[in-house]
Image (spheres, rainbow, N blue to C red):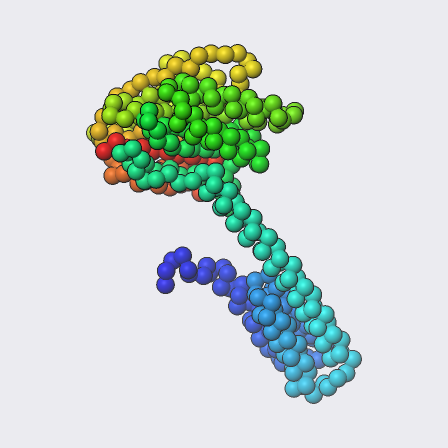
Amino acid sequence: MDEARRVPPGRTLVLLLPPLLIAGGVLYDLITPRGFTAIPFFTAAPLVAAPFYSLMGTVVTGAVALLAAYGVHLRLGFGMDADTVTEVVTVVTVAVLAVGLNRVVRRGDGRLASQREIAVATQRAVLPDPLERIGGYAIAARYEAAQADAFIGGDLYAVQDSAYGVGLVVGDVRGKGTGAVAAVAVVIGAFREAAEQEASLEAVAQRLERALAREGSRRDGIEAVEGVTTAVLAELPHGDGVVRVVNRGHPPPLLLYPDGTVRPLPAREPALPLGMSGLGNWPDRADDAPFPPGTTLLLYTDGLSEARDPHGVFYDPQARLAGRGFRDPGTLIRTLAEEVRRHCGGGMADDMALLAVRRP
């Protein structure tokens, strides 16, 4: 059987528990004296079934428990005495309650499924997977949510091809929830438009700054600063063999060379994150670096570089990737995601966005 379709052992036990309780109740009633009752077994069976069985399964479990309780009394020759009537009424009452519980649980599951579908649709709309090949470069991206069953948060990535080159952005919006998602949409929308229209990476960064400033002016209180975004913008001009980078308070990208060398690209002049123009204006200056064939550019959020193990040791992507080779960007980011999960002991404290671009 395929591993993804195999029923977990714990769930199998829960599914078997209602019939086991009914069988145990019958056995208990048959081997114990008249003064002992197995009613807890018969009432527990439909209650256990309610959260895990279908409506029909819960009804059938309650009916079988009722028939078993009444059948044992007939088998022992007790008939419809007061004790038998009391136990029958008790099982019927609990079975009805179990059916009601089943409907409540199923409605909750339906709402959760709807929320998941909405989250998936939102992620695909705001953070669509880039094409595997853009402008001659091999590309892969991945979003890893720290919270289970979450699909999108404050981390972002985008790729845009234009007449000036292939533009890239990876960022991390301050804040959580719908406000952060709204800021992500603003940043990505402004980036795609600016990358098509602006001839320089510095001008693209300024367009993002103005877009976040407009978004912040529509908010009040603490929400006004929740659009602040650390970001790194990169551009791969067509045919030049270089990468240009503007860093706005974000972890520096990494260049992974074919021989296993890993080189960070820190900003020569540190700059404030996007959305903080109210504190002053500093001109953006792009840094250039050679981008030879076979080299991979890795952009990431601090969910990677600040991931900690149970002892508080940070995951160091530069050290971890040194001396290693990856056949394509997709393999690189899958490996990183798996290693970070293991490093954190299966859980992550922050979301993580990864974007890798390789020059063939």
User: Which residue of the protein is positioned furthest toward the bottom in this rendering?
Assistant: 77
Depth check, front residue: 273 or 218: 218
Q: Quadrant of residue 23?
A: bottom right
Q: Quadrant of residue 342?
A: top left
Residue at 46% in and 59% down: 8
Depth check, front residue: 193 or 74: 193
Instruction: Note whether 100 is above or below 229 in the view shown.
Output: below
Instruction: Note whether 82 is above or below 162 in the view shown.
Output: below
Residue at 56% in and 30% down: 175
Depth check, front residue: 329 or 303: 329
Residue 195 lies, in percent from the top left, at 40, 26
Residue at 59% in and 70% down: 56
Of the 4 image quadrants, the one containing the N terminus is bottom left
Q: Quadrant of residue 101?
A: bottom right
Residue 166 lies, in percent from the top left, at 33, 29
Residue 18 lies, in percent from the top left, at 58, 69
Residue 319 appears in the rendering? no
